[in-house]
Image (spheres, grey):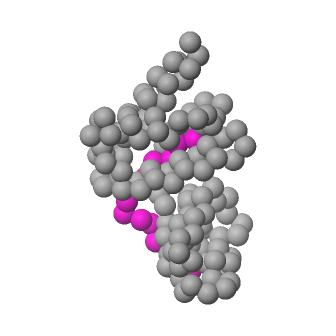
Amino acid sequence: MSTRVRRVVVWRTEVENRPGEMARALRALAKQDLDIVIGYNGAVIDIAPVVGKAPATAAKSVGFKPLPTPMIRVEGKNRPGVAFDCARALGDAGISMDSLVVQVAGKKYQALFGFASDADAKKAANVIRKALKATKRNSMK
């Protein structure tokens, strides 16, 4: 599996912290192919991708709004140290992250990076691509 690095718009809503609120918030989007659903503290829900007019209308109808935080999504074959390699490359390049969520499912990982500006996100995408390509080459030696 090749590594994929791309921009993504994350949508967020805040709900009451009580039973059933996650389901209520997601009901309007139940037929959408959401790749990311993250709940925080029982009251904040992030989703992505929301692509197209109908999904955007559905998301807005239950209070979701696009986050202003520029985000990139990185996916690939999991291996030890992949999050470290990305974090180190970003730090070495002088790019600060606003947020990071990484998960592994089977042999695949997915990471969601948030940045302070579009310029940082664009630069970060290139830095991460290069870093993961270099570590892949080094692991093949």
Residue situated in front as seen by the camera: 79 or 22? 79
The residue sitting at the top extreme is 141
The residue sitting at the left extreme is 94
Residue situated in front as seen by the camera: 49 or 88? 88
- Left or right: where does residue 64 sit relative to residue 121? right
Check the picture and name the quadrant holding the N terminus: top right
Q: Position of residue 122 (x, y in %)?
A: 35, 42
Q: Position of residue 101 (x, y in %)?
A: 51, 54
Q: Is residue 89 above or below residue 139?
A: below
Q: Position of residue 130 (x, y in %)?
A: 42, 28
- Left or right: where does residue 112 sit relative to residue 25? left
Q: How many marks?
A: 0
In this orientation, does residue 60 appear? no
- What residue is drawn where x is 63% and y is 77%? 22
Q: Which image quadrant for residue 86?
A: top left
In this orientation, does residue 72 appear? yes
- What residue is drawn where x is 52% and y is 18%? 137
Q: Position of residue 75 (x, y in %)?
A: 58, 41
Q: Which image quadrant for residue 88?
A: top left
Range drawn in magenta: 62-75
Residue situated in front as seen by the camera: 12 or 134? 134
Q: Residue 103 magenta-drawn? A: no
Q: Is residue 12 above or below residue 104?
A: below
Q: Residue 64 magenta-drawn? A: yes
Residue situated in front as seen by the camera: 128 or 7? 128
Q: Is residue 67 above or below residue 124?
A: below
Q: Is residue 139 above or below residue 121?
A: above
Check the picture and name the quadrant holding the C terminus: top right
- What residue is drawn where x is 56% and y is 59%? 48
